Image (cartoon, helix red, strand yellow):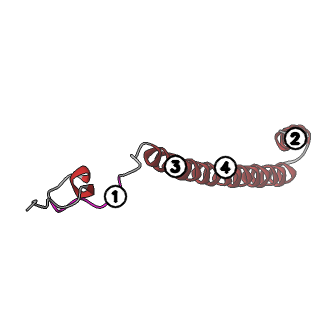
């Protein structure tokens, strides 16, 4: 904001100088004003580019945080025995705990 106020002041002084001066002075002042405006525009463009880069980094950080949170939430909902190996014998856990059938003689 201070830059814009200073630039405006320079432009006003340039306009006063052009109104009171000869054409050589006017041309020099116009060229100086153009240079100042171009410099201010370049500075603003650099600020905009930096802000854009910061916004992109922030968006990437938010995406990573959301992915981590989703992953953590998915693990919370997993049952405790989700990683237990499957019973491939065809018998239930209760049947596996019983001793083998023996016949009495």
Name the foreground residue: 96 vs 48.
96
Asked whether 69 or 87 is in front, the reply is 87
Please tell me whether residue 10 belongs to the stretch shown in magenta. no
- Quadrant holding the N terminus: top right
Q: Are marks 2 and 3 in contact (CB under 8 Å)?
A: no
Identify the mark at residue 51; answer none if there is no mark.
4
Classify 10 Å Cα crowding around label 2: few (below 14), some (14-19), many (20 and above).
few
Q: Secondary structure at mark 3?
A: helix
Ranked by sequence position, the earlier of labels 2 and 4 is 2
User: In the rendering, at what x and y percent does residue 32 appear?
Assistant: 82, 54
Image quarter of residue 11: top right
In three-dimensional space, the C-alpha distance between marks 2 and 3, rounded to whole angstroms, equals 36 Å
Tag 2 secondary structure: helix
Q: How many marks?
A: 4
Asked if disc 2 and disc 4 are in contact, CB closer than 8 Å, the reply is: no
Among numbered discs 2 and 3, the one appearing first in the sequence:
2
Q: Does the magenta stretch mainly form a helix, a strand or a loop?
A: loop
Residue drawn 14% across and 57% down? 90
- Which residues are the magenta region? 82-89
Please state which of the two labelled residues, at mark 2 or mark 3, is closer to the viewer: 3
The residues tagged by marks 3 and 4 sit, at their Cα atoms, a distance apart of 18 Å
Q: Indicate which disc residue 84 carries.
A: 1
Rounded to the nearest angstrom, the CA distance separating label 2 from label 4 is 19 Å
Q: Which mark is residue 63?
A: 3
| Residue 14 picture location, percent across and down | 87, 43
- The residue singled out by tag 2 in the image is 2
Residue 96, picture quadrant: bottom left
Q: Quadrant of the C terminus?
A: bottom left
* Spatial CA span between label 1 and label 3: 32 Å
Label 3 packing within 10 angstroms: few (<14), some (14-19), many (20+): few
- Is disc 1 placed on a helix, strand or loop? loop
């Amino acid at each position: 904001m201070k830059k814009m106020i200073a630039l405006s002041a320079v432009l006003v002084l340039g306009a006063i100088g052009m109104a009171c001066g000869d054409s050589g002075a006017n041309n020099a002042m116009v060229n100086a004003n153009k240079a100042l405006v171009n410099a201010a525009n370049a500075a603003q463009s650099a600020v905009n580019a930096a802000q854009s880069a910061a916004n992109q980094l922030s968006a990437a950080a938010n995406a990573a945080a959301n992915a981590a949170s989703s992953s953590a939430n998915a693990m919370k909902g997993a049952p405790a025995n989700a990683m237990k190996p499957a019973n491939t014998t065809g018998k239930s856990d209760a049947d596996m705990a019983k001793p083998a059938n023996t016949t009495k003689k």
